[in-house]
Image (tube, rainbow, N blue to C red):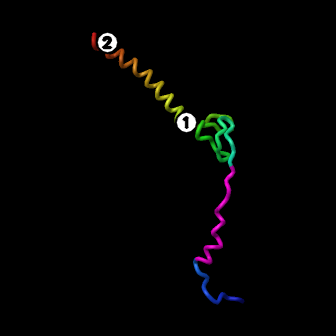
Amino acid sequence: MPVPKRKRSRARRDSRFANKGIKVKAIAGCLNCKDPIVPHTACKKCGFYKGVKILATKADRKVKRLAVKAVKTPVKQASAESQAE
């Protein structure tokens, strides 16, 4: 049975596997906002996946915070006015 005469160097061994991991990724467009995304993932910009909203985006959280703040602010003002009387 044939046996190698010399040990194969690390550089020669590793160069065989150097190009295995390089692959071109496919890019699809979001159906809602037309932003480029990787297929089969939710859009990070609008939060939609297959036409259904599944993620709360940064803009959604901001709108919700402002709504909560608007509700709390009049309550504080009313309580401050009642204490002043």
Between residue 62 and residue 1, name the one nearer to us: 62
- First-in-chain label (1 vs 2): 1
Is the stretch drawn in magenta largely helix, strand or loop? loop
Circle 2: residue type: Ser
Q: Is residue 12 magenta?
A: yes
Which of the 4 quarters of the picture holds residue 36?
top right
Mark 1 surroundings: few (<14), some (14-19) or many (≥20) residues within 10 A = some
The residue positioned farthest toward the right in the image shown: 1
Q: Which residue is mark 1?
A: 57
SS state under label 1: loop
Element at badge 2? Answer: helix
Q: Which disc is residue 13 wearing?
A: none
Residue at left offset 41%, top offset 22%: 72
Residue 9 position, x and y percent, is 59, 81
**Residue range corresponding to the magenta coloring:** 11-26
Specify the amino acid type for callout 1: Thr
Image coords of residue 75 (percent x, y): 39, 18
Number of numbered tags placed on the structure image: 2
The residue indicated by pointer 2 is 82
Query: In the drawing, does residue 68 fall left or right of residue 84?
Result: right
